[in-house]
Amino acid sequence: MACEVLCTADGREKTALSRRYAERWREARAAGAPIPVGTANPPLRPARPEKPELLDPRDVPRRRPGSPQGQAAILHAVAHIELNAVDLHWDIIARFGHVPMPMGFYDDWVKSADEEAKHFNLICDCLEARDSHYGALPAHAGMWRAAEDTAEDLMGRLAVVPMVLEARGLDVTPGMIEIFRKAGDKQTVAALDVIYAEEVHHVAYGSKWFHFLCGREDRDPVTVFHDLVRRYFHGPLKPPFNEEKRAEAGLPPDFYWPLADRSGTV
């Protein structure tokens, strides 16, 4: 199921499949007959539509958020992030099925993949309301790098994807919501409010299972997290941090502040 999602290129088709399989998983769990997890051989990179064109991050055009074009560019970037997130959550299931984990691990990431699919569709609806669509602009080619770098390291994947990249979403989403609130775009504000609330859970799942693995191996979570982020994440973490939402997600300051770029702080 996970590999089929990963091998589906079209964004709307990928997310429809993600939601359908998530529902099938939940129904089977509720019936007391869970779908066997098994092992898989997922592709190193997921299938992608022909558009958007994927560029080096330095080559993605910058646009002013106060303009309609800039706002569309923000939405396009968010849609791209959400589509990658769908694949990231199915990939952690497919790629690490050989690691013995409680069934709750799969419950959490199936739920996350389902929610990311919903987020992608919400943002695509916002783009289409602006007479645009996902694929109309170039996108960031580096989004999948964290997955490739941690393809053989479950703890590294948990540290870098939910606990760094998705936690960054908690930092920047309030500012995006304010941009669209000022623009009077109620549809986008409502969509981003949903995303903001649910992304806290995804960071929390990362923290929960990271701590679970550290406990099983009798290792200090803070030290292991710092080592893994320095190994797999390219560059310092960027403040300001949303400390309240990070704490709500089980991510205290001693995890991220020692890794921060403090050049812009007082």
Image (cartoon, rainbow, N blue to C red):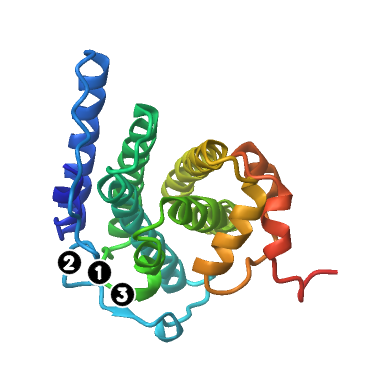
What's the residue type where badge 3 is placed? Leu
Q: Dot 1: few (<14), some (14–19), or many (≥20) neighbours within 10 Å?
A: some
Q: CA distance from mark 3 to mark 1?
A: 5 Å
Q: Which residue is mark 1?
A: 135
Residue at position x 66%, y 54% from top? 223
- Nearest to N terminus: mark 3 or mark 2: 2
The reply to whether the C-beta atoms of the residues labelled 1 and 2 are less than 8 Å apart is yes
What's the residue type where badge 1 is placed? Gly
* Residue lying farthest to the top in this orientation: 31
Quadrant housing the N terminus: top left
Q: Is residue 8 visible?
A: yes
Q: On residue 261, which mark appears?
A: none
Q: Position of residue 112 (x, y in %)?
A: 37, 40
Residue at position x 26%, y 72% from top? 136
What's the residue type where badge 2 is placed? Pro
Q: Which residue is mark 2?
A: 49
Q: Position of residue 75 (x, y in %)?
A: 40, 62
- In the image, taking residue 98 as reference, residue 245 lies left or right, namely right
Q: Secondary structure at mark 1?
A: loop
Q: CA distance from mark 3 to mark 2?
A: 13 Å
User: Above or below — where is 28 with respect to 225?
Assistant: above
Q: Which residue is mark 3?
A: 137
So how many labels did they put on this image? 3
Quadrant housing the C terminus: bottom right
User: Above or below — where is 201 with respect to 151?
Assistant: above
Q: Dot 2: few (<14), some (14–19), or many (≥20) neighbours within 10 Å?
A: few
Q: Nearer the viewer, residue 193 or 36?
A: 36
Q: Position of residue 173 (x, y in %)?
A: 55, 54
Q: CA distance from mark 1 to mark 2?
A: 8 Å
Q: Dot 3: few (<14), some (14–19), or many (≥20) neighbours within 10 Å?
A: some
Q: Secondary structure at mark 2?
A: loop
The reply to whether the C-beta atoms of the residues labelled 3 and 1 are less than 8 Å apart is yes
